Image (cartoon, helix red, strand yellow):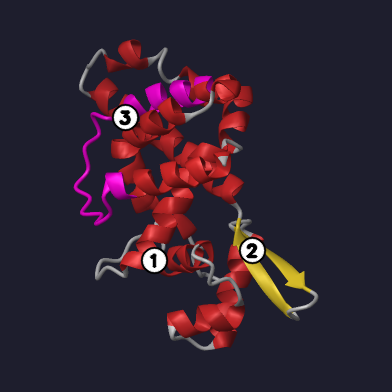
Amino acid sequence: MGNAGRKPVKVNENDTYSKLIFLIASGNNYNQKISEYSDKDPSLIFGQLKRLKDKKYIIGKREKYLNKKIYSVNWQKINNEFIEHLRKFKKRLLKQNAEANSNIPQIYGEKFKPLDNKIFLERIKNNKYLTKCFETYFIKLFEKETKYKYNIEDIFNYFILFGDDMLIKIESFLHIKEEKCKKELNDFIDLIKTFKPLQMDLPLQITLNECTEKILKDLENEMY
């Protein structure tokens, strides 16, 4: 019978799979090291890593000299999943307000247009500053070792509420030579601001300033 009847794993909503991705983002990127931190049997970890690889959340590469497979996070996939998360929020927001006979669909119609612009979204998926934001969140989650359990969807929800503040600081820090990237970030900042009315009770124990300072420090180091 095998896996018949078993529901497919929704990685973004799954604490276990999300933790594996946080571990890999933090540099614990091979089977034995991941097993040590997870306190799980290597064979179980191997199966979970395979599922993440099949779903394109991680990339595995055999290191010839280390004689082991090293994993890395597929950040384009993470960015893409965040875009899909925004799409779901858009549908929910429009549905809720349509049922309430609200005029929000007319007011926000223009603001939602970037979610239908394939060229814009493709560039956002490859935007290194958006990637840096998520990478920092993932690493900080691992470093905090908080008693709370978080998953990738929690990160997305947190980012919808506070990510625009982080991106605004990054945008103001960028060199003028990256004007095109700044424009895309500004458009994206306006987009996620649209979702601000959707307040969420999210006790995510990571401060915005801590993550932002880390990102700006990394960007500054890249300049010199």
In the image, taking residue 217 as reference, residue 125 lies left or right, namely: right
Which amino acid type corresponds to the residue marked 2 in the rendered image? Lys
**Residue 81 seen from this side:** no
Mark 1 to mark 3 CA distance (whole Å): 27 Å
> Which residue bears the numbered disc 2?
53
Q: Quadrant of residue 12?
A: bottom left
Q: Quadrant of residue 146?
A: bottom left
In the image, taking residue 67 as reference, residue 133 lies left or right, namely: left
Closer to the observer: label 2 or label 1? 1
Which of the labelled discs sits on residue 195, or is there none? Answer: 3
Ranked by sequence position, the earlier of labels 2 and 1 is: 2
Q: Nearer the viewer, residue 122 or 90?
A: 122
> Which residue bears the numbered disc 1?
142
Crowding around mark 2 (Cα neighbors within 10 Å: few <14, some 14 to 19, many 20+) is: some
Closer to the observer: label 1 or label 3? 1
Residue at position x 25%, y 34% in the image = 198
Which amino acid type corresponds to the residue marked 3 in the rendered image? Phe
